[in-house]
Amino acid sequence: MELLLHTCCGPCATYSTEFLREQGYAPTMYYYNPNIHPYQEWRRRKESLEKFAARQKLPLLLEEAYDLSTFLQRIVPHEEERCGICYRIRLEKTARQAQAMRIPVFGTTLLISPYQNRDLICQVGHELAAAYNLSFCDLDLRPGFRRSQALAREYELYRQGYCGCIFSERDRYYKPKRSGAIRANEYVTSQWQEGGRRDD
């Protein structure tokens, strides 16, 4: 059965496509990831996926536009709910594309990651499937996560260190630590507490 597979990157595609083909699906990979920041990261993941698709002779559909502005406009006012919004942005685009291509089933390689919210992804996927008269493939790909990493190394694919969005990049690498040095915000606060703002 044909399946349009939203694909976030090359490493996650390795085991996912292998397993889905074993289950009788014929996946077409679909790269639509406006969440990925910065642009060079988005491009590296796209190129990694293209390399994998060529190696495995798998069909790949690319959204070449880097639509970061749309993503940020949706996310910034609702940062605490960003993952659910991000899932919906990418999966709805995939569902629309599947409908346009008359592919009856869609899914996502996000389901291979133990770091993603599987229940929320499946909830969003099934809601969109009902809305677009499609089926959502909710097979659990997580048991193949370690194999996907091993295959990525074998195929020499670029492997990223964060999910992709600017917020996850911040949370992974920005770890504020207190030290003996006074910080700028502490300095400003101390000046107000001592009797008002100082401009000198």
Image (tube, rainbow, N blue to C red):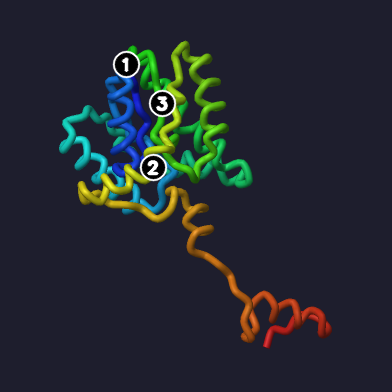
Instruction: For mark 3, give the secondary structure.
Output: strand
Query: How far across and down, in percent of the image, does residue 79 sit?
Result: 60, 46
Which of the 4 image quadrants contains residue 48?
Answer: top left
> Residue at coordinates 49% horizontally, 45% vertically from top-left?
115
The mark found on residue 81 in the picture is none
- In this rendering, the label closer to the viewer, 2 or 3: 2
Query: How far across and down, in percent of the image, does residue 182 sit?
Result: 65, 83
Query: How far across and down, in percent of the image, does residue 122 sit?
Result: 52, 28
Label 3 environment density (alpha carbons within 10 Å; few <14, some 14–19, many ≥20) = many
How far apart are labels 1 and 2 at the CA level? 29 Å
Label 2 environment density (alpha carbons within 10 Å; few <14, some 14–19, many ≥20) = some
Q: Do the CB atoms of the residues marked 1 and 2 lie less than 8 Å apart? A: no
- Give, as a three-letter code, the residue at label 3: Gly
- Give, as a three-letter code, the residue at label 2: Phe
**Residue 158 position (above or below residue 6):** below
Q: Which residue is mark 2?
A: 145
Q: Do the CB atoms of the residues marked 2 and 3 lie less than 8 Å apart? A: no
- Give, as a three-letter code, the residue at label 1: Met
How far apart are labels 3 and 1 at the CA level? 14 Å
Which of the 4 image quadrants contains residue 136?
Answer: top left
How far apart are labels 2 and 3 at the CA level? 16 Å
**Residue 34 position (above or below residue 121):** below
Q: Which residue is mark 1?
A: 101
> Residue at coordinates 67% horizontally, 88% vertically from top-left?
200
> Residue at coordinates 29% horizontally, 42% vertically from top-left?
10
Label 1 environment density (alpha carbons within 10 Å; few <14, some 14–19, many ≥20) = few
- In this rendering, the label closer to the viewer, 1 or 2: 2
Quarter of the image that includes the N terminus: top left
Q: Which residue is mark 3?
A: 107
